[in-house]
């Protein structure tokens, strides 16, 4: 306290009076210290001067100057900024000196932003490669102004730490065409060190626009970005992904921009050329990797065009949705019309039968008793519902098919008994004839009656498992899929990285959080037509069960045994294909492509099983076996997508498994399951070849089956050889092609053998076949247009993007969705109606093939 009081007293005494002169001296001393440096060397202080040169800069004038560590040059510019007119300012710098040890630092100070860069600019590539650029061009961010007109100043500071003089050129110019005009194409040149960006302002009444950037040059690879109006603008290769939406591009790039995402009603279109082409699928040149080695990137200038066009309006969205609904609702109306016509014809036919049965004087025949034919007048027979009504003579004449010789007491058992307590393992009508299964199934000519001996209730229960299993699979498969694609879409919206999803960006119409709503909407047909098919099957099932409960002869004794479980499974699979295809198109890429194809495999497999079940109801595969095999197919699909690209070992293993599976299945089909896979299989094969081919030179016992299986093996072996040689990148589509080829082969064989056996195809089934074939042809045409492909990089995929072709809303792939859903629905109807002509034919007169 004592020293404190003494100090205060001295301060007041001596310095209080001299306060008028010591403060200016202190200011001078501080200013002098700012421009001098005292350095200690060898025990002495040396003074070094740092010169600051300030110049008034002029636009469109080139300044040739030299900078060293001892001088710093500041260029002062001013320009008038108008609220109604946006004018860009561009700074171009070129360093003329070579072999610089220290770069030149340029700092541009504006009202609300600072831009700094060094020359040479060092941009890094993969593996820490360094690319120097001596010529730079940067556009300055224009701060917003609220005044009608305002003069703003900015300064360009040039400095270096190099003691040697470094020559440089500086030019500041105005960018007259800084603001993009709607529907007007603007051309410009960009490079890694000279990025470009332009401003676009939403016109009145326009809420969504599409920004399209194109070039005639594939490479160099470039990036287009959409950023909000704010400073700084991220316009270099190493920071362009920090903000906004962006995508890589070679020749084409397009981003749909909505006004609601930009509160200022304007945005920047930024185009940056990358230092390397690897991101766009280009070659990556090999360089020896040495520490701190600089690599000459060469000429990487690229000429580009940009155009901003208004996107579709809300009315087009409404028209697209109404068009989609209208197409598929028309199938409901057409089905209802056909059902009404069928019911009308069935009632007329039933009335005519009743008149014939109650007029013995006219017909000369005794009316049939219920004990002989069942309750003929109680309900409409299943034959009438399926449009396969026979002639009056065939329906009333018991001598034609020997109905009088058959007792209905055993066959026409009550259908009211519950099926829930019956299991196939507990109830098998073949137990009594186990000894002659081999005899029955290995006859040279089999009839459907030979392979439909099991109790109908047991088989119905067995095939209903197909439906319940696929419904369970659908729930457990769809829930994580939906969760995953929602996550994908969230990541795209948050990060702005549009390289994650492979859209057709030229025709991707957003709605809410969905980036390509049109691709999702077009999958509605699968769901609606799948539901319609389920309703048709349900109607047939109800009518058939009603006929069975009334002991109708045609339902009990004639035609292909009707089991609807597989049909229900097919309809469910079609609906799930639509749902999962929509999920896939939320963010299509190679990691979730199996969502779009898994139920395609299911549909192909179920259709082949249904074809086989028609003539082999007793020995068709169980649901557990079938779905286990389909699970194996999907497992290989995933392995092929992940590991199959260019992997020779994988393709060898898959081809061997494919060929072995084909041989095993062929043996199973040829011998109707009456063979054993054990240690003696090779010995038996050699014996059969010796006795049948060498010793007797006899032909195959089952010629028709042999022809089908030989053709099937040729097709499958050829596909296996193609896969092993070509090794296609799209393994999932290759696997789907195998399934479709086998389905088409079996389908064609079935129709040919049906006609060859003297059977005929009804008018309704024939119309379905022709209609489906035509629709499949058009559908495949649009499928092979290939608007995008995840087999390539996102930039290369965008080269295939094209504009909308239907209602300015749907593209080629959407039309594929429309046509393929209709074609699948038609294919299901063909399977459902193809054997309606056999509904009045005894099963012991229907051949198995």
Image (cartoon, rainbow, N blue to C red):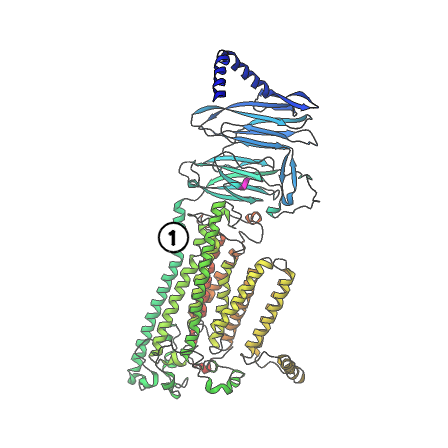
Where is residue 630 drawn, in percent x and y?
51, 67
Q: Is residue 574 in view? A: no
In the image: residue 80, left or right of residue 304: left
> Quick check: 373 above or below 142?
below
Where is residue 222 drawn, in percent x and y?
58, 42
Where is residue 655 drawn, in percent x and y?
62, 66
Numbered circles on residues, count? 1
Main SS of residues in magenta: loop
Label 1 sits on a secondary structure element that is: helix
> Quick check: 534 above or below 145?
below
Q: Check residue 235 for magenta coloring.
A: yes
Residue lying farthest to the bottom in this orientation: 405
User: Residue shown at 52%/46% (left/top)?
Assistant: 497
**Residue at label 1?**
322
- Image quarter for residue 107? top right
Q: Is residue 736 in view? A: yes
> Quick check: 434 above or below 727?
below
- The magenta stretch is 234-241
> Quick check: 302 above or below 97?
below
Q: Check residue 505 for magenta coloring.
A: no
């Amino acid at each position: 306290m004592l020293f404190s009081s003494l100090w205060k007293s001295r301060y007041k005494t001596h310095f209080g009076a001299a306060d008028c002169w010591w403060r200016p001296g202190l200011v001078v001393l501080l200013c002098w210290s700012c421009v001098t440096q005292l350095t200690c060397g060898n025990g002495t202080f040396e003074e070094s001067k740092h010169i600051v040169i300030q110049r008034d800069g002029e636009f469109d004038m080139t300044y040739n100057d030299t900078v060293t560590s001892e001088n710093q040059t500041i260029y002062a510019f001013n320009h008038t900024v108008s609220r109604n007119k946006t004018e860009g300012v561009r700074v171009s710098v070129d360093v003329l000196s070579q072999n610089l040890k220290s770069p030149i630092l340029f700092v541009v100070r504006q009202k609300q932003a600072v831009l700094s860069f060094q020359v040479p600019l060092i941009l890094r590539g993969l593996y820490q490669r360094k690319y120097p650029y001596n010529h730079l061009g940067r556009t300055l961010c224009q701060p917003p102004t609220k005044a009608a007109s305002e003069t703003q100043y900015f300064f360009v500071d040039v400095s270096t730490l190099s003691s040697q003089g470094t020559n440089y050129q500086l030019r500041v110019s105005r960018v007259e065409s800084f603001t993009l005009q709607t529907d007007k194409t603007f051309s410009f040149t960009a490079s890694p060190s000279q990025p470009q960006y332009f401003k676009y302002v939403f016109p009145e009444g326009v809420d969504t626009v599409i920004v399209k950037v194109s070039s005639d040059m594939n490479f160099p690879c470039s990036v287009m970005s959409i950023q909000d109006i704010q400073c700084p603008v991220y316009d270099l290769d190493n920071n362009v992904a920090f903000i906004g939406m962006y995508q890589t591009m070679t020749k084409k790039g397009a981003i749909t921009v909505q006004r609601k995402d930009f509160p200022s009603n304007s945005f920047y279109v930024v185009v940056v050329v990358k230092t390397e082409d690897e991101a766009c699928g280009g070659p990556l040149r090999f360089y020896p990797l040495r520490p701190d080695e600089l690599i000459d990137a060469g000429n990487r200038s690229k000429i580009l065009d940009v155009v901003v066009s208004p996107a579709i309006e809300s009315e087009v969205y409404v028209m697209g949705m109404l068009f989609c609904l209208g197409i598929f609702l028309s199938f409901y109306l057409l089905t209802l019309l056909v059902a009404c016509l069928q019911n009308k014809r069935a009632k007329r036919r039933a009335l005519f039968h009743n008149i014939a049965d109650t007029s013995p004087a006219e017909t000369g025949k005794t009316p049939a008793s219920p004990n002989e034919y069942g309750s003929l007048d109680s309900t409409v027979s299943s034959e009438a519902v399926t449009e396969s009504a026979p002639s009056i003579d065939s329906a009333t004449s018991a001598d034609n098919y020997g109905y009088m010789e058959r007792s209905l007491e055993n066959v026409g058992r009550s259908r009211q008994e519950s099926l829930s307590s019956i299991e196939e393992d507990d109830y098998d009508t073949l137990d009594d004839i186990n000894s002659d299964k081999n005899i029955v199934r290995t006859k040279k000519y089999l009839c459907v009656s030979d392979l439909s001996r099991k109790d109908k209730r047991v088989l119905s229960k067995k095939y209903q498992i197909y439906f319940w299993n696929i419904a369970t699979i659908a729930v457990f498969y769809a829930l994580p899929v939906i969760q995953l694609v929602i996550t994908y879409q969230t990541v795209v919206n948050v990060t702005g990285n549009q390289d994650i999803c492979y859209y057709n960006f030229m025709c991707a119409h957003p709605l809410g959080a969905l980036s390509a709503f049109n691709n999702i909407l077009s999958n509605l047909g699968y769901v609606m037509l799948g539901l319609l098919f389920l309703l048709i099957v349900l109607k047939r099932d109800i009518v058939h069960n009603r006929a069975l409960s009334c002991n109708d002869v045609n339902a009990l004794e004639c035609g292909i045994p009707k089991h609807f479980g597989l049909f229900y499974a097919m309809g469910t699979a079609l609906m799930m294909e639509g749902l999962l295809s929509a999920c896939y198109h939320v963010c299509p890429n190679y990691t979730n492509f199996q969502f779009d194809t898994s139920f395609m495999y299911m549909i192909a497999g179920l259709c082949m099983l249904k074809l086989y079940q028609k003539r082999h109801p007793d020995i068709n595969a169980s649901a557990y076996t079938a779905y286990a095999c389909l699970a194996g197919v999907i497992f290989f699909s995933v392995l092929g997508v992940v590991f199959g690209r260019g992997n020779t070992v994988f393709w060898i293993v898959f081809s061997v498994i494919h060929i072995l599976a084909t041989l095993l299945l062929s043996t199973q089909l040829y011998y109707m399951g009456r063979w054993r896979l054990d240690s003696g299989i090779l010995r038996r094969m050699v014996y059969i070849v010796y006795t049948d081919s060498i010793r007797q030179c006899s032909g195959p016992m089952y010629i028709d089956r042999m022809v089908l299986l030989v053709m099937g093996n040729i097709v499958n072996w050829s596909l296996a050889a193609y896969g092993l040689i070509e090794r296609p990148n799209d393994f999932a589509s290759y696997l789907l092609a195998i399934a479709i080829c086998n389905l088409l082969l079996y389908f064609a064989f079935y129709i040919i053998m049906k006609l060859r056996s003297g059977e005929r195809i009804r008018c309704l089934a024939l119309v379905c076949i022709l209609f489906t074939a035509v629709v499949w042809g058009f559908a495949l045409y649009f499928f092979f247009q290939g608007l995008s492909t995840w087999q390539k990089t996102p930039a290369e995929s965008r080269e295939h993007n094209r504009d909308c072709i239907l209602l300015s809303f749907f593209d080629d792939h959407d039309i594929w969705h429309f046509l393929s859903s209709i074609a699948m629905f038609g294919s299901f109807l063909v399977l459902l109606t193809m054997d309606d002509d056999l509904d009045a034919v005894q099963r012991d007169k229907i051949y198995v093939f």
